[in-house]
Each structure stands twice: as structure tokens, then as C-alpha cells.
Image: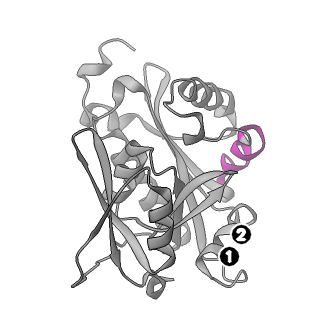
Amino acid sequence: MNNIEQISINNLLHSVVRFDETDFQQIRHFVLELCKKLDDPTYFITDDIDSDLPILLKEKYGLVYGIIHENNIVALQAIDYNINKTLIFYDILGIDKNNDTIIEIGWAMVSPQCRKKGFSIHLSKLLEQAAYLEIGNKICVTTIHPKNTNSLFLFLRLGYIGIKLTCHYNVIRLVMIKKLNSYFSIVSTQESIIVKNDDFEQQAQLLENGHVCNAAFEEQSNVFLKFIKFNSKIWL
């Protein structure tokens, strides 16, 4: 990947591809290699990659997009349409399981040399738009570790809000939601409550008491989450 550090998002957007079943091994290698470089191995769970990824690559079950440079994957993102995989979110969000409403976005990964170039947010927007055109205005759910700041800032920029702290895939996760093709317009007269991103106990308490996480910021090498009192269920 020669000189990729000097390549901008505008140069690479024409290299966005929708992957299919023939790309499984290349994607698998990309994901597992990047996972070896994570600050915390629980940021990204790969236990089900061999069972779930081939299903996602089938057209009717999901979307898997990536950016290719010199025949190598440099960015990846996916949306899962499979209702059997998203049933847990119906319980978390209090939605009737007979209502085919929820899809899950994830697998957001970018090569280290391509980070902070806008690849993830551009790829995510393209993926959301494609999903909206294919299946309509569903509720899109993602789960991230609150200390995974790259993913946290990405999904907050995309308009997601954090509504619950839970144990998903046997590790701690902040559940974030968004309606495809729309943003949450949150107006609150209450002051924000600021919590460090590693204070899981206070985060969980605020979320259980009807607050949502709608912003984050970095200060003196620490990351803080902003919570406000708000009823997110009006969108569900």
C-alpha cells in the first residue's frame, strides 16, 4: 500500500465495493489482523466470524462495504438484516418481536495508516443510504465498548444516541440507536451530565433513569460522555 498516507478520501471513494461471498477469506484476514492491534481485545468480537460473516455476504441478509487500495482492503463496514441475530435488541428496546424493525450496523474497521481521514464516516453514510434504499427506514442499532473512542466518536457523529449499557457477546457494550435516513433532534432544557468513559456504573445508572448519551469530547487525554434526560422511545 504505497503512499496511502498521502491519499485522501476523495481519491479512494471510487474504490468502494460491495463484497460478496467470494470475498470472505480476504475480509476474514483483514479483520483478524487488525484485531491483533487493538488496545483492548474486547473492542471487537470475532468468535462468530466464520458463522456470521458468510451469511452477511449473501445479498438478502445484509450489506458489507469496503474500500480497496492496490487490491487490499483498507476499510470495512457492514449492516446485518438477519432478524435472528437482532432478537436481543427487541428485548433491550422493548419492541414487539413480530415487528421487523431492527437492523445492526458494525464491523467498522480501518487500517491504522488510513485513520483520521474520514474513511469510516463516509463508508458508514454510503452503507446507511444503501440499506435505506433496500429495506426502508429501520431502526439501526450498534453496540460499542464505551472506551473504544474511535467507534464512539464515529457513531455519535453519524447521529446515533446511547440508550443502554449492557453485556453483549459477554462483554460490556453501549447500545446506540438511530433511524436510517434521519437524525435524532434532541432539545433539552436540562444541563448535560458529564461522565468519564470508563465510569460504567454511573453510565448504567443514568441510562436506566431515562438519560441518553448524545455527545462526547476529549480533554487532557481523557474522554467524557455527555448525558441528558430524554425519552428515546418516541422513535421506536
Which residue is nearer to you in this view: 164 or 16? 164
The residue lying at 45 percent from left, 88 percent from top is 234
> What is the spatial separation of the Cα atoms under label 1 and label 2, in whole angstroms?
7 Å
Res. 24 image quadrant: top right
The local crowd at label 1, few if under 14, some if 14 to 19, many if 20 or more residues have their Cα within 10 Å, is few
- Please name the residue that numbered disc 1 is placed on: 91
Element under disc 2: helix
Looking at the image, is 196 positioned above or below residue 150? Answer: below
The local crowd at label 2, few if under 14, some if 14 to 19, many if 20 or more residues have their Cα within 10 Å, is some
- Please name the residue that numbered disc 2 is placed on: 87
The residue lying at 34 percent from left, 47 percent from top is 122
Residues rendered magenta in the picture: 49-59
Where is residue 29 drawn, in percent x and y?
A: 63, 25
Contact, mark 1 vs mark 2 (Cβ under 8 Å):
yes
Which label was assigned to residue 129?
Answer: none
Q: Majority secondary structure of the magenta segment?
A: helix
- Magenta residue check for 111: no
